[in-house]
Image: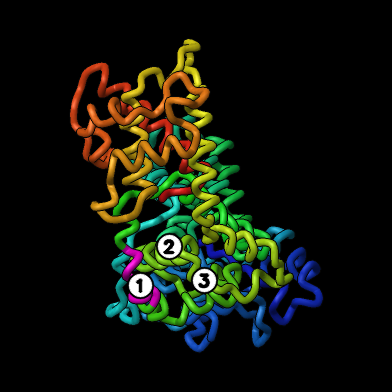
Amino acid sequence: MNKLRIDVVGLSHGDVRNHWQEYVTESIGKKLTLQPQPDNIVDRYAVRVREGLQNIGHVAVTDQHVVYQVLKASERERLQGKVVEFVEEPPLLTVEVDVAVVDSDYDDYDDSAYADWYYDGIPLLPRKMEELGDMIIDLEDALKDEAPKDEILAMAKILIKEHLYDASREMTRKRYWLEQQLSQRPEPELQAIAKQLREQKGMLMRYVNREQVARHLFIEWPTKLKHQGLADYHYTYDNRLNELEEQLHAFPNQLYDKFLTDPVDFLREVYYKHVSRRYLFPLLSGIVLMILKGRVQIERWGREGDTEPIEQIKKLASKLTESQREEKMKEALSELLIKNDAHGKPIICQKNQWAAFASILMFDYHLLGSSKEDVDMRAFCKKMTDWGFGADSKYKVFCDYDNVSKDSDYALFAFKDWNGGGAKHQRMMVAATELRDLLRKKIGYN
């Protein structure tokens, strides 16, 4: 017989909710039954925990799959064990169960509801989640290879801070495995990390954590994307927004609609619906795209009905008027024309660098229009003169048609399509990059 440890949470919501503190502190040795609850409307994979006929709580979502693997291997309908350890706050009980065999390959989760769902929009997965996924793989390999303590500890510390940002089924299951592996290491520091992971089980879906993650996913990340800019092909989706929005509305369990109702509560739904990364990440990408395109109307933010996050999301999609855009462009040009490099030398030192400015303003920001016919060097130079950057301006490096036209291979092509080398090409690259970066901060991407 092997001894398996399963954690129980939710005591403050069960039949002992009025005296859960007393129950927890007196729980050692209590015999509890772990029983699947397929009719649970919140989580069809929930495992109810009871003492006799009294509902105590539920098996932590992180531990559910192990219960099902034991039940599958033993062909039993429920498990029984004794409480061997507890955490007072947040309340958590550890039940030790004697098992003969575990079917570790068994996966009870049914993804058939997602079989016909797809989203073919641009992937906009938060970098934090990508990095977390990569780090989990590295940590898993390090534990299997029995890597040095310091290497494992560095990654485990990141895990403790970041794992709440991933509510996918895969991350939920990894938490259990990582906790078990870290607890078996001899180093006190790694055992302490395992203890922290265990103690966090009772607070994974606490409101304060969900609200923090919702702010990152739906405010901080879209804000960063707006300021940094997206790839060019992002804008090819503008004429498909209705189609993409329909795909999101078709997500099973109406999760997109639940996001629109309350983004904070949406994360709880994702967690208890055990959504796989395969489907969750495209859903999140679609949500971010709709936020940036001003296609979301959020009804409520969290249980307190906070309006400030909703206003922040609305501002993400707000667009400048044409006159405001032009003022921002003038500001960027003015700043750049007097900017020096690290050695104190002007970054813009030759008139032909205006050809680089022309490329960015005409192709990336459609200064004269959005069609190819609108790309006109003479019209661009006249516009610059009207803006105060011509020969009679205060600037030493002013816009001059003769100089711009000599470098039409830059002015008449999009920055991404430039080819070349040498000192002149490098100067053009610097001018274009500097202006593009300034405009992204002032206007956004395009």
Numbered mark located on residue 226 in the image: none
Label 1: which residue?
244
Where are the magenta residues, as a range?
237-245
Instruction: Residue 192: name its quadrant.
Output: top right
Residue 35 image position (x, y, % from top left) = 52, 81
How far apart are the alpha carbons under marks 2 and 1?
9 Å
Q: Tag 2 or tag 3, which sits nearer the N-term?
A: 2
Q: Is residue 12 left or right of residue 350?
A: right
Q: Which residue is mark 3?
A: 296
SS of the residue under disc 1: helix
Q: Residue at x 61, y 62 (%)?
A: 210
Q: Residue at x 44, y 71 (%)?
A: 274
Q: Earlier in the sequence, mark 3 or mark 1?
A: 1
Q: Is residue 238 magenta?
A: yes
Q: Give the residue number, with chain letter if any, for mark 2.
A: 289
Number of residues whose C-alpha sits closer than 10 Å to that of mark 3, classed few (under 14), some (14–19) or many (20 or more): some
- Would residue 128 be found to the left or right of residue 83 on screen? left
Instruction: Report if the CB atoms under discs 2 and 1 are less than 8 Å apart.
Output: yes
Q: Amino acid at mark 2?
A: Leu
